[in-house]
Amino acid sequence: MSARAPDPTERLFAQLLSLQSQVRAATSSSNLAYCLVNDAQTLFGFRHAALLIAGRTRAVTGISQVEPHAPFVAFVERGARELMARGISDQPQRVDMASMSEAVRTDCQSLSANAVFWLPLLERGKIPFGGLWIAREQPWSDAEQALLTQLGDCYSHAWLALEPKKPWRLRWPRRKFLALAISVVLLLAIPVRQSVLAPAEVVPLNGTVVTAPLDGVIAEFLVRPNQPVRRGKPLLRFDATSLRAQADVAERSLDVAQAELRSNAQRAFSDSDAKARLDLLAARVEQKRAERDYALALLARSEVRADRDGIAVFADADRWTGKPVQTGERLLDIADPVQAELRIELAVADAIALAPGAEVALFLDSDPLNRHPARLQHLAYEAQASTAGQLAYRLDARFSDAPPRIGLRGTAKLYGQPVPLVLYLLRRPLAAVRQGLGF
């Protein structure tokens, strides 16, 4: 008994089922895109098909990598946009080229075939998220349109299974995106007060600087840091061993010179030579007396005393004890504890336009939750090396309320003139770009 010849309808139905199985078996969106534009070619005999998702071409028949700026890709995307603009992109249909724009008709004659079928890909709400642009030379029959419509439901279901989220171009329509862009521009144009942070320290206001009165070694400090002192109270002592020895030697030299002068004065009555030397010996006595007085003055200055009431401001006595110092070297300050100012070191890279009287807020490291207001008094025009080794401008500010304790450190926030928010956020990047590009 011979086998029955397969019916063309049965063969067509089998090809349709096989095509649907291949589509549902795709494991990634790239594999599925390849299947959508290639596997149905034997069934419908089209020249080429292009898959568009959210207005962008994702795959083309016979091409492994889509070139976004290729003429055919631009033509297909332009045609799909015209269908969407006319509000018919959600219906499977034969594309009437006569109703399309002249540019689309011209590109279709040179790049594609005249018989074009648009197969939309719809999400659950029947809203198109993409589609297939299928072109061939022969017109599309009603039966083929019905098969393509059935395949379109399968294609949509398979694509949404692999990419359940909408593309951002669909999640953000043009109007919504435009509204968001306008809102961002308006937000960036909002004026805000420009501000910058810088390290700061509470320092004495109108304090007296105590410097080393002579070259020597500090023997001991007689006060502690931040200790109240009275006028005339000893602050520190230098090692006076060598000074005391110099004073003794100067005293003895003066005695010798005076004795020599008296001896020659007695012989001057009978000795003309002794009388001639009197002036020289008298001058030598005055010289030795001056040396003795200078040595005694240095010895007296070996003990440094306070010349005003206040508190002793310095870091640590052990830092100075036993250390040799030179004349004029700064040792400590004597300041009024209720008179203090804020000293700020503003890095060159953070410098903004500041005017005298600008608002300053100090946040102490020991008390970061409380704000100490101040006003800018002085701004140095020349940058100098700071204690951290970087170039910085020195700024002085006066406290509006009771000042914190002298010696406390923290972070100062300086407020400048109002500027647009975009400049406030991009000031440093723009400066870096200008330095890098040289304009």
Image (cartoon, grey):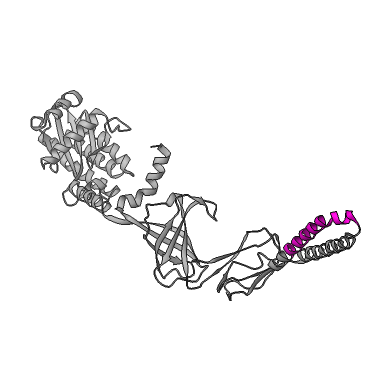
Expressed as whole percent of the image width and height from the top left, the position of residue 265 reads 86, 61
Residue 84: quadrant of the picture:
top left
Q: How many marks?
A: 0
Q: Residue furthest left?
A: 99
Q: Is residue 167 visible?
A: no
Q: Main secondary structure of the magenta part?
A: helix
Camera-side residue of 407 and 92: 407
Query: Which of these two is toward me, 56 or 280?
Result: 280
Q: Is residue 388 above or below residue 249?
A: above
Residue sitting at x 39%, y 59%: 414
**Membership of 274 in magenta stretch:** yes
Percent x, y for residue 182? 21, 49
Q: Say above or below: 50 vs 371.
A: above
Q: Going 14% across and 35% down the picture, which residue do you hit?
A: 144
Q: Over which residues does the magenta segment extend? A: 271-295
Q: Can residue 116 be seen at all in this image of the molecule? A: yes
Residue occupying image coordinates x 26% and y 29%: 70
On screen, 313 above or below 90? Answer: below
Q: Hey, which residue is sitting farthest top in the picture?
A: 110
Q: Position of residue 148 (x, y in %)?
A: 17, 39
Q: Which image quarter is the C terminus in?
A: top left
Q: Going 20% across and 35% down the picture, which residue do you hit?
A: 77
Residue 389 in the image, given as x and y percentages of width and height: 55, 52
Which quarter of the figure is the N terminus placed in?
top left
Residue placed most toward the observer, 148 or 275: 275
Q: Residue furthest right?
A: 270
